[in-house]
Amino acid sequence: MNNHNLFAALRAAFPKDLDQVAVETVESGGPGLRYTWRDLDRASAMVANLLASLDLPQGARIAVQVEKSVEALVLYLAVLRSGCVFLPLNTAYQSAEVAYFVANAEPAVFVCSPRNHGWVSKIAFTAGTRYVFTLDDDRSGSLLERAAHHSDQHTPATSAADDLAVIIYTSGTTGRSKGAMLTHGNMLSNAQVLRDYWCWQPDDVLIHALPIFHVHGLFVAIHGALINGSPMLWLNQFDAPSVVSLLPRATVFMGVPTLYVRMLAEPGLTPEQAGHMRLFISGSAPLLIETFNTWQARTGHTILERYGMSETVMLTSNPCAADARHGGQIERRGGTVGFPLPGVELRVVDDAGAAVAVGEVGSIQVRGPNVFKGYWRMPEKTVEEFTADGFFKTGDVGRIDAQGYVTIVGRSKDLIISGGYNVYPAEIEGFINKLPGVAESAVVGVPHPDFGEVGVAVLIAQPGAQLNAEQVRVTLKAQLANFKIPKRCFVVNELPRNTMGKVQKNLLREQYKSEFA
Ligand code: MLC
Ligand code: AMP
């Protein structure tokens, strides 16, 4: 294949009959909209032609912070086929967060929700962005108005496997986000591997209920369906009763553990209701063994857990069918994330970088065609995160058993994963420490029945200052994405420290572990 453009490969997998339904939206008040494969092709061609008319420089970044909609998917496809670089942003990000991304990535175009146009355009134009368009989840906004004047025929750009396709920001341990640079080749190779490993079938139908600004909803789910020419039942927002009611019309579902926990609370979730389904996939955060077992008992299905990251797309997976590389193993083993995917090299090493013995715990490192190109404009950080022989240091801690199953036992990076979203304590502490009256703070993750894990903040007041814990949360809400706000704050007289003076976060985690029990 000469052209490695991801859109060209996805387009080649569209069914022959382009008038079949590709996406059907699920609306609460009545019948949904149906988009054919031809609609996806023509609409993305029009938006790609609009982008081409703007005469953007090579490698221009297109930042997108819009509510989930099929038109937002069309915009993603348009950016891929245009050869520009897609830069998705969580809709929860507030102005300070967006200002950082814009300054760092210098997008040529920003597409935002109409209600955010005022503050987004101010930030974007100040930083040198040339065009700001709007797109709402009801198909309104300037992007589609402008695209309507363009042709619905477009030849996808020719891309090398190594060409940049997406920059996806992941928060950093130092408090500053890093843009992971993913290429057409990274994502295409991963999509092809998963199509085979998860045994996608000609009659598969995917329920798409995840946000489309992160790896799971944007790449794993969308690429998975498109590269198999499979239709999607599309929810702009996750809603457990709706998903349960859709099961008889679908075969594949992907979710973070919180979605499974919420679906288990639905009385309508029965083996009969799930009888038409082929595959339930979980990832982005640890799936508790209780959830795995309860799901099996309630539905008769064994959830397939897999593991990945923004920097690497998918790395490991439990088997869908017999895995010849692992003795024909077909068991989906709860509490594990399965085997390294074909083409992915995964090793577990000790602090000196030497491979540990089978079953021993160590740091997980990976190498393969799926591993990203580096952090955007952070060459030193990129070098730091790779070993001399080209393995990426994931920051996850785990072990591999004698049969080859990988288990994640923890993280060396100070990270909280809440409902599938990553929260870096250092970033939150940075904001809290700037609040008036705060001397110091520590943010730790504690167990939560719905989100798996949530952050709590422990604060020390400056001498003489009175701190109101709830007021701290309210103030933070105006500055940070809502999922990053500590669910509770505690004001204390001192933080536990070791002899070096470092805050002992393990003791805080222990102290507050039953807050949400
Ligand atoms: C919402 N809130 C959260 C939260 N989501 N708090 C912590 N963690 C979260 N994930 C806040 C809300 O702002 C609200 O605060 C309160 O919690 C209750 O909100 P809710 O109505 O219950 O939330 P809801 O809108 O239903 O969203 C929950 C959710 C959503 C689970 C559906 O978080 C979600 O879609 N998560 C999926 C994330 C995802 O796709 N991750 C993949 C990353 S890729 P308040 O104060 O306003 O009441 C990746 C790589 C890989 O990790 O391997 O896949
Ligand atoms: P992100 O940077 O948002 O892509 O998050 C990636 C991180 O999510 C990984 O480094 C893991 O810590 C975590 N993760 C993803 N999938 C799993 C899983 N199945 N089990 C445990 N952790 C996971």
Image (spheres, rainbow, N blue to C red):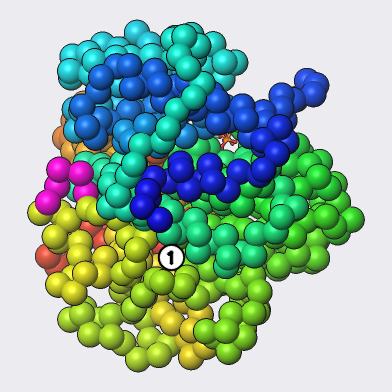
Say which residue appears at 47% left-offset and 34% top-offset: 77
Say which residue appears at 67% left-offset and 43% top-offset: 16
Judging by the rendered image, the residue that carries numbered circle 1 is: 315
Residue 356 or residue 196, whichever sits in front: 196
Quadrant hosting residue 104: top left
Disc 1 CB within 8 Å of nearest ligand 1 atom = no
- Give the magenta-colored segment's residue range: 375-379
Q: Is residue 466 above or below residue 182?
A: above
Left or right, residue 55 beside residue 190: left
Quadrant hosting residue 499: bottom left
The total of numbered circles placed on residues is 1
Q: Is residue 174 above or below residue 211?
A: below
SS state under label 1: strand
Report the magenta stretch's main SS.
loop
Say which residue appears at 71% left-offset and 27% top-offset: 34
From this viewpoint, is residue 234 visible? no
How far from the left and from the top, in percent, is residue 95? 31, 22
- Say which amino acid is labelled 1: Leu
How far from the left and from the top, in percent, is residue 498? 19, 65
Left or right, residue 232 beside residue 126: right
Query: Around disc 1, counting alpha carbons within 10 Å, would you say few (fewer than 14), some (14 to 19), or many (20 or more)?
Result: many
